[in-house]
Image: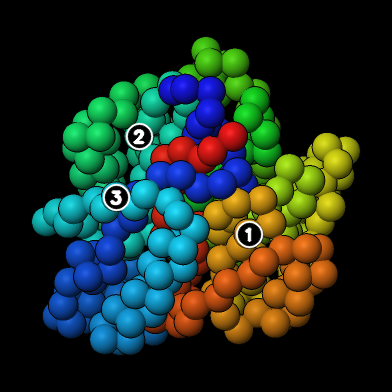
Amino acid sequence: MPEKYTSQSEYLPLDQVLVMPVAEAFQDRSKIEAEWEKLNYLELPDLPLALAEYQDFMSLLRKSGAEIFSFAKGDSLTLDAVYCRDASIVTDQGVILCRMGKEQRQGEPLIQEKVFETLDIPILGRIEAPGTLEGGDVAWLDRQTLAVGRSYRTNSNGIEQLTGMMRAIGVDVITVALPHFRGPSDVFHLMSILSPLDRDLAAVYSPLMPIAFRNILLERGYQLVEVPESEFDSLGCNILATGPRQCVMAEGNPITEAALRKEGCTVSTYTGNEVSVKGGGGPTCLTRPLRRRI
């Protein structure tokens, strides 16, 4: 990859991104009715409202100037495929295909692999059984450092495999042991409590963050925007950076939004009740960034 681009950042200006359109993931009301409870959604999503919300989200993504590609629907995919970050990790040397910790989602990496092939993006590796790893548990702290949450979706074996792949390309891995919280059925990833927004700024939900990892962020010079408890379930800590201090987040988080603006962030919001809150996937979950401009 030319040096003017990198895949190893969460905050540099977004240049290329993949999405799974909600129309392809949700498809129709019968599919939603058949799957939402089994997938542990909070409530039955309303398809027309979800489509409208997603259209608004996509308009914000387009305003970033990023080139947008789409994954195709597949018979093995569930509603959760809309949260396309989880099935892969992108590095400057290629893609690592994940092995999903949520059993119903294990068909997603294969579907994504086909799209990466059409885009001539090489496959660097893949997580094999018994390892599990989901992209929502992975966040770049800088271009040489990757934080990985050990959770109910990402196990120690998966992290060991990832660490070996990262070591081979000169990247250090920091493992973050996540708490039990609401248990195995809940959607709880590292990026549920961490969103890097600039080289020295991150939104965090400290009550669920290990002290050792929080101290690592502080030692690295991060200023932390603390998301309040009242805005955790409304995805106040799941924020997509489309550029340094350029943020997209679900609406309904006014305290966090005001705190971000105080730190010089430009914040755009979308209504995300149907497409984000009910399924537990905010704007970072709805995107698989491919590369960012240096």
> Does residue 62 appear left or right of residue 52 in this picture?
right
Q: Quadrant of the N terminus?
A: top left
Q: Secondary structure at mark 1?
A: strand
Q: How is the image coloured?
A: rainbow
Q: Position of residue 189 (x, y in %)?
A: 55, 54
Closer to the camera in the image, 96 or 16: 16
Q: Secondary structure at mark 3?
A: strand
Closer to the camera in the image, 175 or 95: 95
Residue annotated with mark 3? 69
Closer to the camera in the image, 89 or 180: 89
Q: Are marks 3 and 2 in contact (CB under 8 Å)?
A: no
Q: CA distance from mark 1 to mark 2?
A: 28 Å
In the drawing, what numbered circle is on residue 42? Answer: none
Image point (29%, 58%), residue name: 20
Q: Secondary structure at mark 2?
A: strand
- What amino acid type is highlighted by mark number 3? Phe
Q: Residues within 10 Å of mark 3 (few under 14, many from 20)?
A: some
Occupied quadrant, residue 241: bottom right
Q: Are marks 1 and 3 in contact (CB under 8 Å)?
A: no
Q: CA distance from mark 3 to mark 2?
A: 18 Å
Residue annotated with mark 2? 97
Q: How many marks?
A: 3
- Front disc: 1 or 2: 1
Asked if residue 145 is positioned above or below residue 28 in the image, the reply reads above
Residue annotated with mark 1? 246
| Residue farthest top in this picture | 168
> Does residue 25 appear left or right of residue 44 in this picture?
left
Q: Position of residue 25 (x, y in %)?
A: 24, 65
- What amino acid type is highlighted by mark number 2? Leu
